[in-house]
Image (spheres, rainbow, N blue to C red):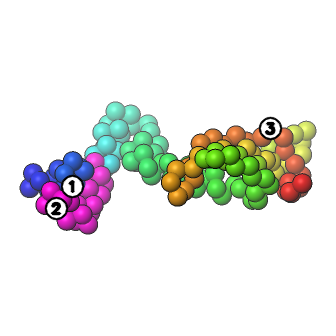
Amino acid sequence: MLVFGLIALGTVSKSQGADSVSAQRMKAEIQRKQAASNKGSLKKLNPNLSEESLTHLSNPPFTNSLKFHKGLASHIQEILSVKVDGTQAKLVVSTTNGATSDGGYFPYSKADVEMVGEGNFWRLSRYQPSNVYYQELPKKP
């Protein structure tokens, strides 16, 4: 049982006598139980926390990170420009981040995106929305 617990925690590898698939399932189950326990503890500490706040605080970090990146991606409409320099990439994208000014709503904007190449994929390094807004979707120059 101790070996299986260590496998679930990622401290013992498959080569040390464990089946990788069952170890991943056990690890996921432990994380779910831990999240439920954390949620209960947080609720006791602050009963005024909303269900959404409790879920956010008790989620594993990768869950919140995935939600954040999915939200960013949902706003991107079009890639306007790309500049690649080795393992660094800078993009300008049009987005649906809008603002109201002088009673008028401007639904579109641009954002600067910086990415870093890591192996066979690109990782988001920086996302900087513009403070200039447009009535129509910005297009490629």
- Residue drawn at x 20%, y 60% is 14
Three-letter residue code for mark 2: Ala
In the image, residue 88 lies at what x, y percent? 64, 45
Whether residue 9 is in magenta: the answer is: no
Do the CB atoms of the residues marked 1 and 2 lie less than 8 Å apart?
yes
- Residue drawn at x 64%, y 47% is 86
Q: Residues within 10 Å of mark 3 (few under 14, many from 20)?
A: few
Distance from the alpha carbon under mark 1 to that under mark 2: 7 Å
**What label sits on residue 131 in the rendered view?**
3
Q: Residues within 10 Å of mark 1 (few under 14, many from 20)?
A: some
- Principal SS element in the magenta part? helix
| Closer to the eye: label 1 or 3 | 1
Whether residue 17 is in magenta: the answer is: yes
- Residue drawn at x 89%, y 42% is 103
Three-letter residue code for mark 3: Asn
Give the residues drawn in magenta, as a range.
Answer: 14-34
Residue receiving disc 2: 18
- The tag earlier along the polypeptide, 3 or 2, is 2
- Residue drawn at x 44%, y 39% is 49
In the image, residue 97 lies at what x, y percent? 75, 49
Visible residue check, residue 95? no
Secondary structure found at label 2:
loop
**What label sits on residue 40 in the rendered view?**
none
In the image, residue 81 lies at what x, y percent? 78, 53
Q: In this view, does 59 lie above or below 46?
A: below
Residue receiving disc 1: 13
